[in-house]
Image (tube, rainbow, N blue to C red):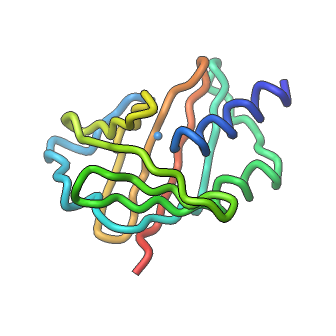
Amino acid sequence: MKKTVNTIIVFLCLAIIATMSSCSSEQITKEKILGKWHPVKATMYAPNGEVQELTEEDVEEIVSTNWTFLSDGTLILEWQGEDHTMSWYLEDNKLVLSTGMEYFIVKITSKMMILNAELNGYTVDLQFNKVE
C-alpha cells in the first residue's frame, strides 16, 4: 500500500500535480493561472472515497515545490532544487499538461487555487497559494 501511495505522490510531483467537478459556470481564463503558485495542502482519497493519510515525508515533497505558469504555455516546476519544464493549456475548466496529466480546476481566486486529479483510482486535491 505504501508503495502505491508513494508512486502516486512521486508521479504527481514529477508530472505535476487536482472528484471531477469544475469551477462554477465561470470560464477559467489563462490570466487567472499565470504566475507562481505554491502547494500548501494535499488530500488523497482512496477509490472507496476514504481519506488516505499521507506521511509527513510525502506532504513535504508536495509542499516543497513551486509551479510557475508562463503566458507562452510553459510550466516550470521547481522540485528538489531543479527546474522541470513542460507545457500546459486550458481546456474548459481543465488544466492539461504535456506529461498527459489533467487537473480539474475546482476553485481559483487571485490568491488561491484548488486542483483535483485522478490517478490509478485515487483522487488527489491540491491547494495552492499564489506567491506574491
Quadrant where the N terminus is found in the figure = top right
> At 65% from the left edge and 53% from the top edge, which residue is drawn?
62
Q: How many marks?
A: 0
Quadrant where the C terminus is found in the figure = bottom left
Residue nearest the observer in this picture, 99 or 52: 99
Q: Is residue 128 left or right of residue 108?
A: right
User: Looking at the picture, how far across and down is residue 23, in whole percent?
Assistant: 27, 44
Residue nearest the observer in this picture, 83 or 108: 83
Q: Is residue 7 above or below residue 67?
A: above
> At 76% from the left edge and 44% from the top edge, which residue is drawn?
54
Q: Is residue 123 above or below residue 81?
A: above
> At 69% from the left edge and 39% from the top edge, which residue is drawn?
10
Q: Is residue 11 left or right of residue 85?
A: right
User: Looking at the picture, how far across and down is residue 109, in whole percent?
Assistant: 30, 63
Residue 72: name its quadrant: bottom left
User: Looking at the picture, how far across and down is residue 102, in whole percent?
Assistant: 40, 32
> At 20% from the left edge and 53% from the top edge, which residue is drawn?
30
Q: Residue furthest bottom?
A: 132
User: Looking at the picture, how far across and down is residue 38, in whole percent?
Assistant: 51, 65
Residue 111: name its quadrant: bottom left
